[in-house]
Amino acid sequence: MAFLRKQTPDGINLGMCYSIFQKCVRRCMLEECLYYGNLIKTYGTPNSLRKRLVQSCLEDMCHWDLAIEISKCGDDELEKYVYIVAKNKKTHISAWAQRVALDKAIKKKDESHNPELAQLVKLTFLDVKEDYGAIRKFLGPDGSKLFTYMGKERLVWTVKVLWESRSILKYPLNRSIDDKIVPRKFDTIPEWCRDKHTVGGKAGYQFFFDNSCVMNNRVYSSTEDYEMTCKMIYLTEEAKYGNKARTKHTIERWREQLKKISTGASTGASDTVPKQLIDYGYYDIIQIQLLTRKSNPKVYFCTQDKANGEKKKYVLKGPINVFLAQNIRETERVKKILDQPHLNVKILKISGELWMRSDSLIDYTNDVITKQSKLESTRNIYNGPNANCNFKKNLDKQFMGVMMAVLLKSLVGANDWAERNFITAAPHSKVYSVDDHAKRDPIKELKPKLNKKCSEQWDTLVEKHKQEIQDVLEKWVKTDLVEESFYEDRLEVLKKLMS
């Protein structure tokens, strides 16, 4: 960054000034903080000093209120805040906690026994998925502004969590100003200022822990919570990855792994998710089921960010040919004429291929199971909650909804009557017919695929609700659909079957 390479009259660049200032803040060296803080303000910008002060509040004080206060202060108040930040108590607990939470999140450790850490793990997941809307909701208006000001710095939400759970951090601040104190320059810059964060500095986390991270006037008199675990994580990562052991590198590796899981690449199946879906802006893409026929298109859950910030979940089916697209459009047209439940189906052209997209009835999860078949190689298949009707358990509660879907499928000549093609959000909610493209097959028995016991129950329910079913068909006959001879004839067949 060119700004940090900018030289000051002292013969050091602004990057070194930053490092000296932060290390002196940790050691409560007020005179030196005043001197190097002024270099940052004068030869950098007032705002660059303001950000360094806020960073120290977050990283070396874990003080939420002061961080927000300084982020809003005027340029003429900056020297006052150098006094306050330099003189008051220090703790590195936010940095320790943040790195431990990242490790727990990557390893999917259950931290429900520690609500503070559990909250940090949850926010870590939101951060790695870049769900900043949810993070901002947690932070509140002032915290959201601070989050923006600090460039989505993870320490912002870390400090918020710790601030709310640890009263020890809310000690009365020493705000006194002593005008007699004279800013002081180092004759020789101490080695403990020259760590891995500076050009030509001493590399390695152990040097940083032993020298650059020394704190005086501590909030915690002894080893801090999360400290030893965090140090072990850093040293282990450093031994494994060398200079690629910084937190940003760990997050990059994790994001890449999540992407592989999302696309199925971790199974070695390169064809699991079509690349064009990712290029089109979809993510968290999961194949819903293995193919049952080689000629069938595949079906996926996926998510896409909308302009209003909503993370919209869809079902995508494809690629499909032009004839299937026409049949799908026809069924959706009929549903709307008959005022039947529909899922806002659209036919999209993605990278020159046709795809069917519908709303997802459920808030699908990322739960998967590895499967393979004669038709498909090893891949991740969805293994979370679904919206399938449960005929064995809920047929009586869902009967009329299922019956309307059966009549609709019969009317357009759809040929897949499996239980999975009747979906609902809840036992008493409306039933949606899916995988019901208009093939115009002959009308068959008005019954979905059922086992013997459910089939007998179905027949009983048909007799019980016969008049209600007939009334529905009479309403359908009065719609514009009857003006089309194909549907006029099929409606008459349905009426006879239900007479």
Image (cartoon, rainbow, N blue to C red):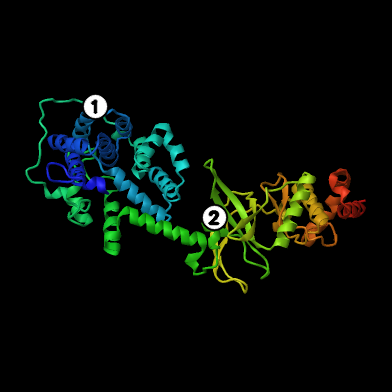
Q: What x and y, as percent, mark residue 98?
A: 34, 47
Q: Earlier in the sequence, mark 1 or mark 2?
A: 1
Rendered image quadrant of residue 153 = top left
Query: At 31% from the left edge and 34% from the top edge, which residue is drawn?
Result: 67
**In the shown orientation, is residue 243 left or right of residue 365?**
left
Which residue type carries mark 1?
A: Asp
How many other residues sit within 10 Å of disc 2, few (<14), some (14-19) or many (≥20)? few
- Above or below, 471 relative to 75: below
Which residue type carries mark 2?
A: Tyr
Q: What x and y, as percent, mark residue 400?
A: 79, 47
Identify the element where label 2 is drawn: loop
Q: Which mark is residue 280?
A: 2
Q: What x and y, as percent, mark residue 145?
A: 39, 35
**In the shown orientation, is residue 169 left or right of residue 312?**
left
The answer to whether residue 436 of the structure is visible from this angle is no
Closest to the observer, 156 or 163? 156
Rendered image quadrant of residue 60 = top left
- Above or below, 269 relative to 19: below
Return the residue at label 1: 76
The answer to whether residue 195 of the structure is visible from this angle is yes
Query: At 12% from the left edge and 42% from the top edge, which residue is drawn?
Result: 10
Closest to the observer, 185 or 195? 185
Q: What x and y, as percent, mark residue 383?
A: 58, 59
How many other residues sit within 10 Å of disc 1, few (<14), some (14-19) or many (≥20)? few
Identify the element where label 1 is drawn: helix
